Amino acid sequence: MDGLYLKLDKKLIFKVDKLTIPHIKRGNTVPDFDKNLDRINKILKFFEYISLKKIEFKNDIYTFLYTDHILYLTNNEFEVAAHNISRVGKELQAIIDLIYIKKYDVRLSGKLVYNYKNDIALIHGDAQYRDIKIEYVVNKNKNNFYYVTKSNRFTQLKPLVEQFDLPPKINEWIVENIKADGYTLNSLKGMGKIEESGVNLMPKTIMAKATLDNAIIKFQKDIPPVLSKELNIRFEDGDLLFDIDSPSFENISLAGSRVSIVKLAELKPTLKLNLLFESRFDSRVESILKSYNIELPIKQRGGKIKTDLKIDVDLLKKSLSFGGDFNISKSTISIGGVEFPVDGGDLHIEDGVVYLKNIALKNHTIDAVANGKIYLKDSKAAIKLKINRLHLGGKKDGLLSIKDRVVPIDIVYKKGVKITLPTYLASMNISDVDKSATIKLRDLKRIKKSIKSLPISIVGGSLSLETKDYDKYNFSGILKRDDCFFYENNDSVCLTQIPIGGSFSKEYLILKALNGRFVLDTKKSIVNLNRLNIDLKKYFEVEDKNRTKTDGQVVAKKMKVIAKKSLLRYGTHRLLTDKYQLGILPNGNFHFRGTLDRDLITVTKNSKQLEIVANRIEDKMLHPLINFAGLQGGRYTVKISGVVGKKMRGVIRLDGGLMSDFKAYNNVLALINTVPALATLSSPGFNSKGFKIEQGIVKFTMIKGTKLIFDSVFIEGKSATISGDGVIDLDTKKIDVDLAIQTAKPIDKFISSIPVVGYIIAGDDESIMTVGLHIGGTLDRPETKTSTIKDVLMLPFNLIKRTIVGKKKNP
């Protein structure tokens, strides 16, 4: 004891440097609290000042001070200052001027009511922590206590968070990532225990609500923060929940988004982000994902995606999982670098897999629906594409068109992108440097029904396409076919493998084949041919077959063909020209105009009617046209019209020239030379040099392309005139032709004295003679003999009045 002083005003001063209070053992009687408390109050009235510097009790050291009716008690855990201490029944009541909890740097004041019999206490009042002013209520029941608090607006969050004894990484995340102009603790309640070691709060019981104004939430260091006018934070069941009002990120509204840190009480803290936004899936959204090392092979141009993104981050282990749902509006979506014109659909992400649900693809090229999966870990995708329409090139004359097919597609997007279509043995490779693409169709047989705007039908081949902007394409390849209407070297080489190349876009198609000998330009509606021969009969057969499979159009619009040094043939007939032009209409009608030197020929098709007109052409153009080389020199006018394959009528007018050097003529010449009665015809008429023609006309009819009917033949020469008719069956090659040959000069007396025979008619004046011949056999082996002259063959000779009888003798 330092001293005991008695003052003149009868108030005592008591000072003690050290006081030891022994611990009461079990079984000892506890002094009566009521009497002791009353006794203390009476004693204190006699003291002005009491100082107990060091009180040792239960291994703890206290300091006690009493002055000015205020009682102070301190130890290593707390400081208490109180006055107006009184007893009411079994309750101790006091005004608490200060309770300072040193561990938490918290200062409390208020009123205390303590039921010492039941060890129940109630204290309520105000508290101060840094710049935080708090109203509180604490209810103690033996060693347990319950508390409820709320605060005014304050500006420092870090000191408050540090009082909750959170794991360092959680503490750091909250302090560093959540900033605001001001913070208000709306409520904080929980439970604790008073133990020998001190006061311990129970984290699992803590429930709190706070409001942050003008909040900034920074989820990751490398991306801009989320902004919120007001952020409400709740702590309950060991979870920290963030209710964000009008949040935004880089001008993207995140309204309705939720953020929480769960399992805090279990010391397994997990950050859960549920971000809701409607925006383009662009670099801003991508930056959020990349900050968590999430790589989605998805980008977007135009339009918006309604996103519900969920990210879970283990804040201790730094591991994460993510998923979400994406509703896509009309836009351009890039998956693995491949752009798709999306018209709507949904994506769902779960367990590292992106599920494509009814993704509608639609533009001028494609109308399809995609379903499938993207495996993020393996950087690959498996998609089923239901193609309603796929069209590459112009609207009507594109290169490729697919309808109503379901096609599986495999995509790998490591170091560029590779797309494979197993159904078509097709693939597409996209460069990761410049995004250019190469498309390969290894077997056109699989896709031949879908290839359009080709002048030929195909049975196979291969095709390679390249593009840098997915608007213009270059292509090359080989087309294989079984029909043959391209040929060269007259007839010997049929071109069934066609090397092609060219380019196309939605505006045009340029197709080059056979090393540039065939060039198609759909924008100009022109086909250029150079030294390329075409069999029109086979071409029309193919087109007729193709029209039955399409809309009946030969070409999508009017087309012009310009050819140089190219031959056209129709079966065995040829149009030999130096150059020609052919205009083709969508309905299959066309007009052909060809020239050879100064000769001109036109061919016109209107509906089913075909007309061929050639005026005074030379034999060079005539021979291949009529497939007959027996007329040489001279000039010839040809007009043929009718329905191809049914009935065609024609007229050929002859002006000069020779008829010679064909089997039937040679047989007639041989017959004339062996029959004495016909010898006069051999000179100067029929001889080995040929029959010289002055003029003539041949009228014929072609039936179904197989039967050639000579309606009339009239050829006038210097020595004789020929009249005839007949039929040639082109299938069997059989000939049935009758001729009447009339001399053009007086016959000698020897001939006129020959007895009359059936195949010779002499005039009344015995100046002329008419011979009847029949040509039979086949085209390869014609047979010629004399025959009775038919009346009809005499009509051109004005011998209608004569009958086929012998010469009348004078009586």
Image (spheres, helix red, strand yellow):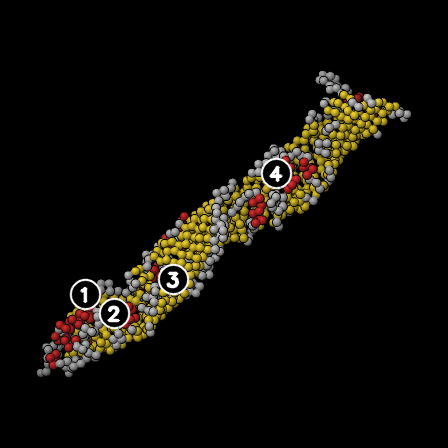
Instruction: Report whether 266 appears left or right of 474.
Output: right
Identify residue for label 3.
516
Label 2 near label 3: C-beta < 8 Å? no
Identify residue for label 4.
261
**Disc 3 versus disc 1: nearer the observer:** 3
Identify residue for label 1.
781
Residue 703, position in %: x, y? 27, 66
Q: Nearer the viewer, residue 178 or 350?
A: 178
Q: Nearer the viewer, residue 381 or 103?
A: 103
**One can see residue 284 in this view:** yes
Secondary structure at badge 2 equals: loop
**Disc 3 versus disc 2: nearer the observer:** 3
Q: Quadrant of residue 568?
A: bottom left
Secondary structure at badge 4 equals: strand
3 or 2: tag closer to the N-terminus: 3
Identify residue for label 2.
629
